[in-house]
Image (cartoon, rainbow, N blue to C red):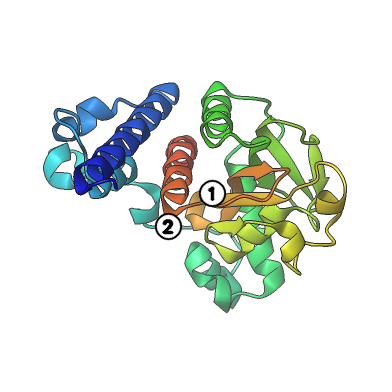
Amino acid sequence: MRGPRQRVSREVDAIDKEVKRRLELAATIGLDPQKLWPSYFGRSPCSAFELDAYLHEALALPAIERGPDAAKDLPAEQTRARPARRQTAGRQPDKEDALAALGAAGKSLLSPERAEAERLKSLHETDLLYTGPEEVYDRVVAAAWKFFGVGAASLSLIAEDAQFFKSAVGPLREEAPRIFALCTETVERNAMLVINDTLSDDRFASNPLVTGEPYIRFYAGYPLHGPRGWNIGTLCVIDQQPRSFSPSDQQVLRTLAAVVQKDIDART
């Protein structure tokens, strides 16, 4: 009969392996977690709490640890929506113009048509569409694909009628009709979307991207936003087999999305 020490030893080994995986992931995407969280890597084992803290805070160190310039590097979800641009001279703003100045925070107050127009405006302001691959995004997408061991990963952008891929690894088309893109649901719901088995989900079981190429059976996506907080796309991973996606996995995807979001914020 195995005793408590053996169980603890196995748990420690599992934690050490997870630390190694996450350190490798951080190195792949250009982070240096040992500098960010030195107290977490000088001893063994790390607790599960510390593992979550390391990954979650890799890009969002508490202000007390980041020094007097901390406010400059707050993560996207903690920054306020940028104000809307000034109205064209000679044109009187109407009620929806005033509400649009609230950015995505005022979405529920706008007509669906105006909200979508503002979202598309935000997307185009990022200059991500039609500008070709970029190394920073390719690096993160490839890291997600490798870390999760999935069939495909992508940074997708939801335009007016189609989903486009700024970066992709795996058997994905260059674009897909927006109406069928699972990432459209992620953008609209403004939260992480995890579908463990698409064939068991009435929303997606008959989707052409599920019943046909690329035969999506698993999906996990996290929304990305442009100026004024409008959701413009996702960082997502898919697989051709159903699979679980633990809270720890979800935290990794959030952090990878934060890397992408930081770059998007810097360019707009």
Q: Earlier in the sequence, mark 2 or mark 1?
A: 2
Residue 215 at x, y percent in the picture: 80, 45
Q: Is residue 252 left or right of residue 40?
A: right
Badge 1: how crowded within 10 Å, few (<14), some, or many (20+)?
A: many
* In front of the other: 125 or 61: 61
Q: Residue 81: which numbered mark, if any? A: 2
Residue 222 at x, y percent in the picture: 54, 51
- Tell me the distance, in whole angstroms, between the alpha carbons under discs 2 and 1: 13 Å
Quarter of image, res 138: top right
Q: Residue at x 20, y 36 (%)?
A: 45
Whether residue 68 is visible, yes or no, is no
The kind of residue on which mark 1 rests is Leu
Q: Is residue 253 left or right of residue 203?
A: left
Residue underneath mark 1? 224
Q: Nearer the viewer, mark 2 or mark 1?
A: 1
Residue 192 at x, y percent in the picture: 53, 57
Whether residue 264 is visible, yes or no, is yes
Looking at the rendered structure, the secondary structure element under dot 2 is loop
Q: Residue 66: which numbered mark, if any? A: none
The kind of residue on which mark 2 rests is Ala
